[in-house]
Amino acid sequence: MFLSYSSSNLNEAEALANELKCHGVSVWFDRWEIHPGDSWIDSIEKYLTQVKYLLILIGNDYKSLFENAYMRSFFRKCTRNKVTIVPIILKSFNSNLILPVFLRDLMYVDLRSEKNFFEDLLKKLNLEEL
């Protein structure tokens, strides 16, 4: 499982990564996997061949995820590789903002309204047996 997030959502991303890891889910989280001197792009490209799920954390500054040309290319590669993309709407997300076109029709987990979001996430990912 790969987590994509804006740096302003680091705390939420790390909390989710820790929760997934505690439930036995293999998580690629940049703060754990990329070390000083490592190539950020090479590290992501290597893991992309193994990932089944991409969780995109959507906060108020989510647009920064899509302004980077490499990240736009990365999302296209995920789609070509049949990676399941799951948007995670963070509690801080302003409902007046508009999601990117390619995310609008995907089933998402909305942390603003779901009380048992983690259990719901595991169900949506068919991981409830973990």
Image (cartoon, helix red, strand yellow):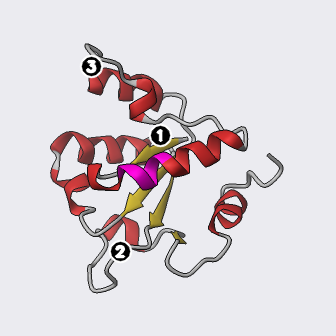
Residue depicted at x 26% and y 79%: 97
Q: Which mark is residue 39?
A: 3
Instruction: Categorize mark 1 by other alpha carbons within 10 Å: few (<14), some (14-19), many (20+).
Output: some
Amino acid type shown at disc 2: Phe
91 w.r.t. 34: above or below: below
Return the residue found at the far bottom. 96
In the rendered structure, find residue 81 and report the number of the disc placed on it. Answer: 1
Looking at the rendered structure, the kind of residue marked 3 is Ser
Q: Quadrant of the N terminus?
A: top right
Residue range corresponding to the magenta coloring:
10-14
Dot label at residue 93: 2
In the image: residue 28, left or right of residue 22: left
Q: Closer to us: mark 2 or mark 3?
A: 2
Q: Is residue 12 magenta?
A: yes
The answer to which of marks 2 and 1 sits earlier in the sequence is: 1
Question: Which secondary structure, mark 2?
Answer: loop
